[in-house]
Amino acid sequence: MTDEVDKSRRQFLTAATMTTGAVGAVFAATPFVLSWQPSVRARALGAPIEVDISKLEPGSMITVQWRKQPVWIVRRTKEMLDQLTRLTPKLKDPESQKSDQPPYAKNLVRARKPEYLMLVGTCTHLGCLPKARFQMGVGEGGPDWPGGFFCVCHGSRFDMAGRVFKESPASTNLRVPPYDYISATTVIIGADTAPAKGAA
């Protein structure tokens, strides 16, 4: 009788110990497994951002931050767009064959919609921050300057589609980030699920 009681008690204690050990192992492993996942801050840094472009006037630009990089959003005028077709002989990569952009931005205007240009605002030479120089024929670009972006670090010049001029140290066009339109006045930078709309 005593042996039966001891055996039952031993089985109960063994089962209880195993259960406690298993629960303890789960609790101990949880922080370790969670540490493999990116933090909320890290996820936020890589997350797409929504930008309201309703107040962006023709000929002006805003700068937003995405993945710790400046992204330019430019609303181009008809005059700015008309210049693009005239510049082909002066550019290193006029058709963006060797440059970094989503497939829907591999066109003359390098955009989903001709009016709006999205560019990562770092020079493709050594990562400096070019300046917007939209006014034609003035500034560092000289009297024949068609308007665009000028890198003050080493003199790389880019047109109003972010395409690099032949005499520039930069070898490729400015990068176009993935993006899409949520509405007519809201763009999302970092997501590009919809097909191209209205690109020329």
Image (tube, rainbow, N blue to C red):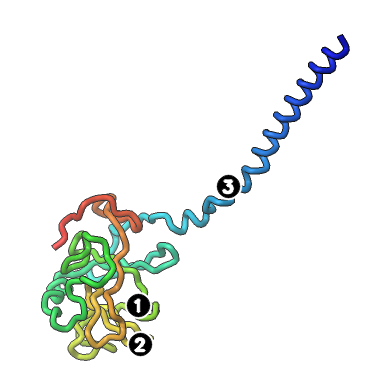
Name the residue tied to disc 3: 34
Going from the N terminus, do you reach mark 1 or mark 2 first? 1
Q: What residue type is labelled 1?
A: Cys
Tell me if residue 178 can be seen: yes
Give the foreground label among 2 and 3. 3
Q: Label 1 to label 2, Cα distance in Å?
A: 10 Å
Q: Which of 20 and 194 is in front in this view?
A: 20
Q: What residue type is labelled 2?
A: His
Verify CB contact (< 8 Å) between mark 1 and mark 2.
Answer: yes
Name the residue tied to disc 2: 154
Q: Which residue is drawn at 35% across and 67% down?
A: 71
Going from the N terminus, do you reach mark 2 or mark 3 first? 3
Q: Label 3 to label 1, Cα distance in Å?
A: 37 Å
Left/right placement of residue 133 relative to residue 87 reads right
Name the residue tied to disc 1: 123
Across and down, in percent, residue 15 comes to 73, 25
Q: Which residue is drawn at 28% across and 50% down?
A: 193
Q: Is 79 located above or below residue 141 in the figure?
A: above
